[in-house]
Amino acid sequence: MVFSSTEFLYLYLPFVLLIYYLTPKRLKNAALFASGLIFYAFGEPVWVLILLLSCLIDYTAGIIMSKNENNPRARKACLSVSVIMNLGLLAVFKYTSFIVETLNGIFGLNLPPNIYAGAANTLFGTHFSIAEIVLPIGISFFTFQSMSYTIDLYLGKIEIQRSFVDFAAYVTMFPQIVAGPIVRYKDVAAELKSRSVTLSGLSEGINRFARGLAKKVLLANNIGVLWRDVKACDPGELPAATAWLGIIAFTLQIYFDFSGYSDMAVGLGKMLGFRFPENFNLPYISKSVREFWRRWHITLGDWFKSYVYIPLGGSRAGTLKTVRNLAVVWLLTGLWHGASWSFVLWGGWFGILIILERLFLGRLLEKLPGFFSWLYTILAVIFGWVLFEADGLGWAFGFLGAMFGGSGVFWDRSSAWIICEYSVTLSVCAFFASDAPKNIRERLGERLKGFGMKYDPLTAAEPIVSALLIICSTAYLVGDGYNPFLYFNF
């Protein structure tokens, strides 16, 4: 029987948690390290070697740095080697094919016959070939995470970790190794030395894991079926309404998929005695693109801010350099997500909007009624998701054209069927992607306090709700085979 990544994670948890709790305190990091390698090996065992190599590069760089505390040149050399080798691994596995395809596009000329074409094709008519390179799962996450250790160590923000097992346990922690959140060493340095699992922490972890699992399995998977079916259609034949319903479905799917996994990781961290940083904060209620990116994939934004934007000068060196710094960050953000021109354009799209908001658009949005600033933001995000999910620029522009009536049809039977079939699912997803659940709970809590209740019944009911969510998610996993984790691809 072949399990999906979701099912494997689900079946793996009870076993690894039992082993972890039974392991003596002094060996818990070793158990964590081993469990991370086993979990990662499920995707493709050979790539464990790449993961271990990444750990070894940064651990060794750290050790050499610590032995040359009074030698700035040696420390800088160690940092340079760490960064170059980490980015080199990322470049080889993630960007080699993209670079080769781009070079072929530039130099693989096929000009029509004329007096100049023969010479041009002789000089530039080159076609490079390369064997297919399989992308190690989660390589973008673990290389950034591991590399942050050497950068912070060089800057004096953290202390050296002399135990390779403890350092590798940090890099390979299975809850977040393949899809984040990106945990910096300083976030968990104290807990790597000493941590404990309390009953309240375990309860919080289970509740958080249950919510994340439900987001992923009950919401993302169900609404994702709609997007899967719409994307399979020819964009040139899609009615505008169907195209909009499809991309709205993807907008909801990717949020519940990614934030669901992040919730599961944070919950599992609490079960293991760690407190991972938050990665999402209701991004779809944002009223500017800048606010959206403060709420979406928070740990990635913090990483680029700390290690790219601020070292380049941030916003301290005048408007032109601020614009340059933002452009660099968003070009890299696009490339981090994937090796294709559609991702470059996706990063450029958000970079341009954020630059405009910083220059003048942000002040205008603050003056608009909240609904209009929210509408601008959600439309900007939706257009961005078209580029993000595109199989190529041709498909992206074709789908954007379909959204604006490129097929000549606004509505047909497929659109009506989608409304009938998915109206409840779309409504439920939109409700839970908003701040309505949070507001309702807060108001109910205030009213219940007004009745003089000593204990919060909503909090008391949370374990029951979590149990129901786990039961429903389990039933869904058993009966359905559509269980992708979208961010495992990065």
Image (tube, grey):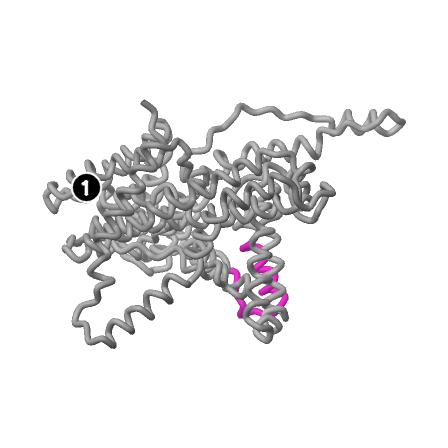
Q: Is residue 306 visible?
A: no
Q: Provide the major secondary structure of the magenta segment.
A: helix
Quarter of image, res 155: bottom left
Q: Measured from the top left, where is residue 352 in percent x and y?
A: 62, 58
Disc 1 marks which residue? Answer: 17
Q: Is residue 312 located in the magenta-colored stretch of the structure?
A: yes
Q: Residues within 10 Å of mark 1 (few under 14, many from 20)?
A: some
Residue 477 left/right relative to 109? left
Q: Is residue 358 above or below residue 130?
A: below
Q: How many marks?
A: 1
The answer to if 325 sits in the magenta stretch is: yes
Q: Residue at x 30, y 57 (%)?
A: 187
**In this rendering, would 191 be left or right of 62?**
left
Where is residue 429? Give x, y as percent: 44, 51
- Mark 1 lies on a secondary structure that is helix
Residue shown at 61% from the left, 44% from the top: 243
**Residue 197 at x, y = what percent?**
16, 53
Q: Residue furthest right?
A: 115
The residue stretch that appears in magenta: 311-330
**Above-or-below relation of 391 to 437:** above
The residue drawn where x is 69% and y is 33% is 105
